[in-house]
Amino acid sequence: MQGNKLNILYVEPFYSGSHKKWIDDYSKFSNHNIEILSLPGKKWKWRMHGGAISLAKEYNNMNIVFDIILCSDMLNLPVFKSLCNDNLSRSKVLIYFHENQLSYPWSPNDKDLKLDRDLNYYYINYTSSLISDYNYFNSQYHLDSYINGLRKYLKKMPDFRNLESIDLIKKKSSVLPIGCNLSENNLKKIEHPIILWNHRWEYDKNPKLFFETLFELNDLKIDFSLIILGENYSEYPKIFDTAKDKLNNKIIHFGYCENYTQYLRYLKMSNILPVTSHQDFFGISVVEAVSYGCYPILPKRLTYPDLFNYKKNNFLFYNSDLELKDKLVSVIKNIKDYSSTIKEISQEIFYKFNWKNISKKYDSAFEKQMG
């Protein structure tokens, strides 16, 4: 397929946030022709159930044969394929897993936990990955956690558990890291420790540990400034309000950025990134912050040891809440001495995950799918 442009249709029931940015950016850098068939990013549970019906109807009306149908993990692929009938017979149907419901921790406030309906979403992911021609995951941690989640899930079934289907899925799955829209930086001179939060304001990012650690440092009269970014919805952990009050004299910015330019400006101002997340299948916000000059302090779990090469950079990692605090205190007090380390890690992340390099891996992977 070298030299020939593939015609790719990306099918996305939840065209918003990181899903939207991912395909929009890949479309800009890919050598192939990419069209997008999507629904607005609202009510994710309904999109997983009903989105396939609306999207199949739109796809059938297009009356175009694509080389590849690339689907989001939010698509109910068995429903989509059944409604498209023979229109998909000449296309390779692939899934890109941004996340999965089997190993994603649900909010303790989610009403579906009380109704015990959450297994429906597991089943959609499971049957979709079983019926696809191939599955891509954004990190090795994500792929491994999905396979382990499937095993636990199917073992709960009363009979005819089809455990052998897990091996079928595993054999047609591999890793394609997320590309990030990064630019090579001449890192700034560090004058003062500025701590950054640039994640969603949700429980799975563990803001409780992040802020309680900062409260302790504040009580110890340790000098630092603070930038709090990230998308906050109508309901968010109330510790953000507590932090805004308790750390008011430390805060440079607190809240969502109006545009990406403003977001990048605050990334470039920051220089320390303590990460406390309970869940991260990849870590776009972490990659972005580090590429723009933040020193990461990372938990030794989830995707981070692979993302930041633990064998080479084990000094970046902590194993306990106390170790997080101790590392953060040390970095704050000595931040001016970390310039060369920050530069090295920033460059490593830039070359590893910028779209100019990653898009070539995507193009090559999709070309191989065509034989």
Image (cartoon, helix red, strand yellow):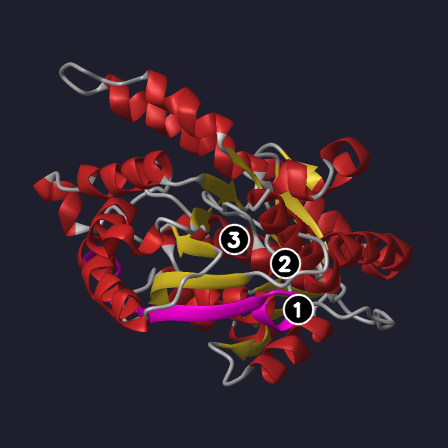
Q: Which residues are magenta?
A: 27-46
Residue at numbered disc 2 = 179
Q: Quadrant of residue 45?
A: bottom left
Question: Mark 2 to mark 3: distance in Å?
Answer: 27 Å
Say above or below: 300 vs 238: above
In x, y percent, where is residue 53?
19, 60
Secondary structure at numbered mark 1: helix
* Marks 2 and 3 in Cβ contact (< 8 Å): no
Mark 3 nearby-residue class (10 Å; few <14, some 14–19, many ≥20): some
The answer to which of marks 2 and 3 sits earlier in the sequence is 2
Give the label, 2 or 3, closer to the camera: 2
Left or right of residue 308: residue 346: right
Q: Nearer the viewer, residue 120 or 250?
A: 120
Which label belongs to residue 62? Answer: none
Which label belongs to residue 210? Answer: 3
Q: Amino acid at mark 3?
A: Phe
Secondary structure at numbered mark 3: helix
Say above or below: 127 vs 230: above
Say above or below: 49 vs 232: above
Left or right of residue 25: residue 293: right
Q: Quadrant of residue 33?
A: bottom right
The answer to which of marks 3 and 1 sits earlier in the sequence is 1
Give the label, 3 or 1, closer to the camera: 1
Mark 1 nearby-residue class (10 Å; few <14, some 14–19, many ≥20): some
Which residue is pictured at 74% across the width and 67% down the height? 292
Q: Amino acid at mark 2?
A: Gly
Q: Visible in this render: residue 356?
A: yes
Which residue is pictured at 59% across the width and 46% down the height? 176
Which residue is pictured at 57% across the width and 60% down the height? 6
Which label belongs to residue 29? Answer: 1
In x, y percent, where is residue 312?
81, 35
Question: Mark 3 to mark 1: distance in Å?
Answer: 36 Å
